[in-house]
Image: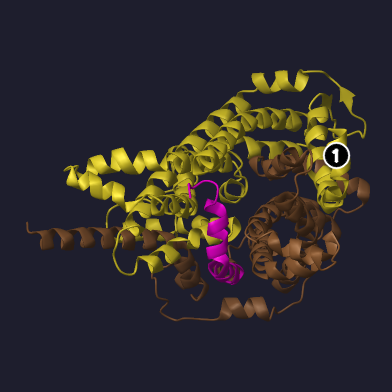
Amino acid sequence: MTRKQRKALHATVVYALIILLCLFALMPLLWMASTSFKTSSEQFVSPPRWIPQNPTLEHYAKIFFPTRISSGSFQIYFFNSLFISFMTTILALIVALPASYAFSRFSFPGKDAAYFAVLGRNMFPLIVFLIPLFSLMRILGWINTYTGLIVAYMTFTLPLAIWLLKGFFDGIPTELEKAGRIDGCTRFGAFMRLIVPLTASGMTAAGVNTFIQAWNEYGFARQLTESASMRTIPVGLAYFFTENTSDWGGLMASAFLFSVPVVILFMIIQRFFIAALTQGAVKQ
Amino acid sequence: MLKQIWKHRWDYPYLLPALGVMGLLIVYPFFYTIFLSFYDTPSSRPEIFFIGLDNYRELFNDTTFQLVVKNTIVWSIFGTLCPFIVGFLAALLVNQKLRGLNFARGLMIVPYAMGFVPASHAWRWILHGDFGVITGTLQSLGLIKDSIPFLQQASLIMPSLIMINTWKSFPFVMIMLYAGLQTIPEALYKAARIDGASSWSQFWEITIPQLSNVLMVTTMLLFIGNMNQFTLIEIMTGGGPASLSEIIVTWIYHASFQTLRFGLASAASVLLFLVLIVFSIFYVRALTRSAVQGG
């Protein structure tokens, strides 16, 4: 083989494997979309068709224009998911912002231990925290309330938000605050007026990430809510199956609507997120 | 020490909200779980009774729990190994100097970006024994006659779940190892080629040693993430049938909120804590080592 032939063979093998991996990666999303546009009878035909023969919007129509408004409709789940994820994001950012700044800039005693405790949370399964949180929420009377779920979501959103924001603060030169102090700012004033505006991109990345985490959460949402009107979408998806019917079309249409915004949001922030994820693990 | 604290006294207010929330939601639950693991918590009555180590004794003698531990080991090891191999391969592929690979890398991140809940429902439908796309395609090709009950047949449940986890987690491995590959100086490979080293020996003698830290960190994160995986298994199988796919976290959930044995579930949680703390120490070691080397 000549050098040129070997190069061509190498490229062919690489592209073939990459195409296989891409198909594997995209297959569930594509099959989800395909099923969501099929009529209820076409879902069950053999051999399975990837392109629907009689594409239909009936499953989406069911979601957007339910024939009967029940307390368990997709719109209510959607509103709950949106509201809870949004409020979780706001609260997590407000709490995480000063904390991550302190972790980035100050050198007070106990800093390492506190930072370790914050990040250590991610080493343990959320479900283990659910037993004590359940009893705590019962004492506080927050079972089946938005407040209960939003506060409970701090368990896993806060550590990641602090970690991401600290990375951004680390990248801002300390000279800025020094200059601000000389101009007569208080330390907190310098933080609020000079540093916070510079972290807009960091806040966006941490905020979007928090939002996605809250949006996708399942275990807490299922256990800390009771009535159908409090369900979020991940919990609501499980109720597409009643005793006798399996509405795969409706389930796939809802799951598709639920996934697409998140995948797009993730693609937008992936550069920030990947930088934070690999920092520390990779020698620079 | 006290002088230091006094000197830095104005640092702490920044942390106050975070520490308050963390104390309430993380430190308190942690100690409450340990406390509850020594108590009997009858569901019929509001009181709890101190029973010493009885919950732990019951766990050790419970044959179902032994099966659950075995499942957790199989799931964690193979659920780490398979995504690791596929993800490493993907990282090596997208690291080649060819056109269009950035775009491919973007597509391959999709499983990582999708939530566990919709992804699990999609896979439940794909693996459906009678109407799933895999069974249907294989049948129409004449490769199989009967349907394949991926999520019902004992020998197929764990492999199916591990395959789904491979799909979900390989992009994470790819992201981490691709970032690692990018930092290896090209000069090392050049020198090796001048010395006549084959691609194979370049891989083992340059790539692997240069990646050792990121390999360690990625493996630990993946392993810990798998041990903690609740949503995927709960939605795919609910731990069933007959506890065949139950792992410790799903068992804890079912023991607490289905059979209402909070004390027993807490004892299992404490055991899980202990195991995870050991793994976390390895993880932190790998992280600090890479930080020291990175300077």
- Quadrant of the image for the N terminus of chain B? top right
Task: Give the residue type at disc 1.
Answer: Ile
Q: Nearer the viewer, residue B30 or B79?
A: B30
Examine the rendered structure and indicate whether residue B216 appears above or below residue A219. Answer: above
Q: Nearer the viewer, residue B185 or A44?
A: B185
Please say which color scheme the image uses: by chain
Choose top left, top right, bottom left or bottom right for residue A67: bottom right
Give the residues drawn in magenta, as a range.
A257-284
Closer to the camera in the image, B202 or A69: B202
Q: Where is residue B82 shown, x and y percent of the image?
A: 41, 43
In the rendering, what colour is chain B? yellow
Tell me which chain appears brown: A
- Quarter-wise, where is residue A84 in the image? bottom right
Q: Position of residue B29 (x, y in %)?
A: 80, 39
Q: Residues within 10 Å of mark 1 (few under 14, many from 20)?
A: some
Relative to B241, A47 lies left or right: left
**Vertical side of A59 occupied by B238: above or below:** above
| Residue placed furthest toward the left | A1
Residue A250 lies in the magenta stretch: no
Image side of residue A259 versus residue A96, left or right: left
Indicate whether B155 appears above or below B194. Answer: above
The reply to whether the magenta stretch includes residue A279 is yes
Residue at the spot 80% in from the left edge and 39% down from the top edge: B27
Magenta span dominant secondary structure: helix
Residue on which disc 1 sits: B5
Percent position of residue B287, x then y: 55, 40
Residue at position x 87%, y 50% from top?
A: B10
Q: Residue at x 47, y 61 (%)?
A: B109
Q: What is the chain identity of the residue bearing mark 1?
A: B
In the visual, does B115 lie left or right of A139? left
